[in-house]
Amino acid sequence: MKKFDNFVSNLEILQKAEQEDLKNEFIISGIIDKFFIQFELSWKVLKELLRYEGKSSANSGSPREILKAAYEVYDFIDEDVWLDMLKSRNDMTHIYDGDAAKRFVNDILYRYIPEFIKLRENIAEQYEEVLSQI
């Protein structure tokens, strides 16, 4: 699945964020931008997998609905963390406060990246045989 390949590639880059200078505003901005891309890829991958599983909820275009449906289907989805990601993503598109951005990056590093990793590992394991066909 092309979306999953993109998800994995972007995650590999995002995982390097902790090694960067987190006092540099340009770096912080780049981490946030990479998170936005990673989040979009994540819910779209989940949408494709729900569609593959024959779930009618996959027909919704809403990230919130896809995340809630994924929580119902997959036991590895932490609904609270994923809904926090969605809220953070929505909030940060309208906030230009440096301190808020630093707190957001902290959440990305220590709450959200681990969830992306868990998603990658579980999808790779569960759909190993069919990922290239989806």
Image (cartoon, rainbow, N blue to C red):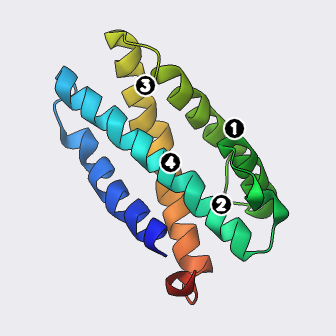
Q: Which mark is residue 80?
A: 1
> What secondary structure is marked by label 4?
helix
Tell me the kind of residue under disc 1.
Asp
> What secondary structure is marked by label 2?
helix
Frontmost residue, 103 versus 3: 3
The answer to whether residue 14 is above or below residue 55 is above
Q: Which percent across, then down, holds residue 94?
A: 47, 16
Question: To which residue does mark 3 refer?
Answer: 104
Q: Which percent across, then down, holds residue 58?
A: 74, 60
Frontmost residue, 89 versus 113: 89
Position of 5 with respect to 50 (left or right) is: left
Who's the residue at 16% across and 23% down the image?
Answer: 24
Q: Which mark is residue 47?
A: 2
Tell me the kind of residue under disc 2.
Lys
**Dot 1: few (<14), some (14–19), or many (≥20) neighbours within 10 Å?**
few
**Dot 2: few (<14), some (14–19), or many (≥20) neighbours within 10 Å?**
many
Who's the residue at 37% across and 29% down the image?
Answer: 105
Question: To which residue does mark 4 refer?
Answer: 40
Tell me the kind of residue under disc 4.
Glu
As measured in the structure, the alpha-carbon distance from the residue carrying label 3 to the one carrying label 1 is 16 Å
Please report contact status of discs 2 and 1: CB closer than 8 Å, yes or no.
Answer: no
Tell me the kind of residue under disc 3.
Phe
Q: Which percent across, then down, holds residue 13?
A: 27, 53
Going from N to C along the chain, the mark reached first, 3 or 1, is 1
